[in-house]
Amino acid sequence: MSTPWDTTYTHKSPAQRSWTEGIPQESLRFIDASGVGPDDAVIDIGAGSARLVDELKRRRFTDVSVLDVSSVALQEVRSRLGDANVHWINADVTRWKPERSYRLWHDRAVFHFLVESEQQSAYVQIVSDCVEPGGFLVMGTFAPDGPDTCSGLEVRRWSIEELSSLFDGGFDLVRGEYKDHLTPWAAVQPFTWVMLQRRLT
Ligand SMILES: C[S@@+](CC[C@H](N)C(=O)[O-])C[C@H]1O[C@@H](n2cnc3c(N)ncnc32)[C@H](O)[C@@H]1O
C-alpha cells in the first residue's frame, strides 16, 4: 500500500528534501562513540534514502538492517547499493514486530513524527524489546527550538532531558548534544541528539 512518504520520495529529489545530508556526520560520531563494531547488529529506523547504510557497509559492518515505511525510499537505496547484503524491512515502526535483537538502534528525524502518546509508547516498547542489554539507542530529533512541521506533517520537538526521561525505564543517558542541521538550501534546523544505553538488568 502506498503511503504519503512514498509520494514525497517519488516527487522530491534528494536536493528538495530538508533532511538530506551527504556523509551522516552526527550519526557516525555517535555510533563511533558507542564502541559498536563491524560484527554488531545495527538497525537504521526510518532510514529513508540516508547514506548511513552506505557508510556502515564501507566500514564492513556485516549485520545491517534498514527499516522504512516507504518502499519507494527503500528502493532508492537498493538501487544505489546494488546487491549489498542488507536486511530490508518495509514497515511502520510503531506496528512492527521485531523477531530479533540489535546492538544499536539508530533513528535520525523519525521519532519526532510520532506526535500521539500512544505512538511514542509503542515505539519505546519496541526499542526496549529489541535493543540488547548493554546495547545503544542513538536518536536525533528536532530540538525544542527546531521546526514545528516537516514535509507538511506536524512534529513533536524534544529536549535531551525529555528524551532521557521518556526512555528511563530501561535506558541510561550516555551523551546528549544540540546540533544544527543545514538543509540542502542552507536553512538551519536545530536537532537534539542522544545516545542511551540499555541497562544490563
Ligand atoms: C525526515 S525523513 C529522515 C530519513 C533518514 N532517517 C535521514 O536521516 O535522512 C523521515 C523518514 O522516516 C520515515 N518514516 C516516517 N514515519 C515512519 C514510521 N512510522 N515507520 C517507519 N518509517 C517512518 C519516512 O518514510 C522517512 O524516510
Image (cartoon, rainbow, N blue to C red):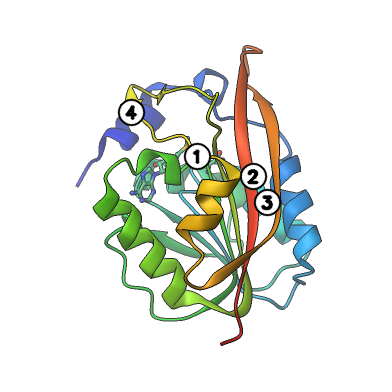
- Disc 1 residue type (three-letter): Trp
User: Residue 94's spot in the image, x, y percent?
Assistant: 31, 58
Instruction: Report the amino acid beneath label 3.
Output: Asp
Q: Is residue 168 visible?
A: yes
Q: CA distance from mark 3 to mark 1?
A: 28 Å
What residue would you read off at disc 2?
193
Q: Give the labeled residue for mark 3.
A: 54
Marks 2/1: CA–CA distance: 9 Å
Q: Is residue 4 left or right of residue 40?
A: left
- The answer to whether residue 184 is above or below residue 176 is above
Q: Which residue is mark 1?
A: 158
Residue at image position (40%, 63%) is: 124
Q: Quadrant of the C terminus?
A: bottom right
Residue 16 point in image, percent of width and height: 51, 18
Residue at 73 percent of width and 58 percent of height: 31
Residue 50's x, y, as percent?
Answer: 58, 42
Within-10-Å neighbours for mark 1: few <14, some 14–19, many 20+: many
Q: Nearer the viewer, mark 2 or mark 1?
A: 1
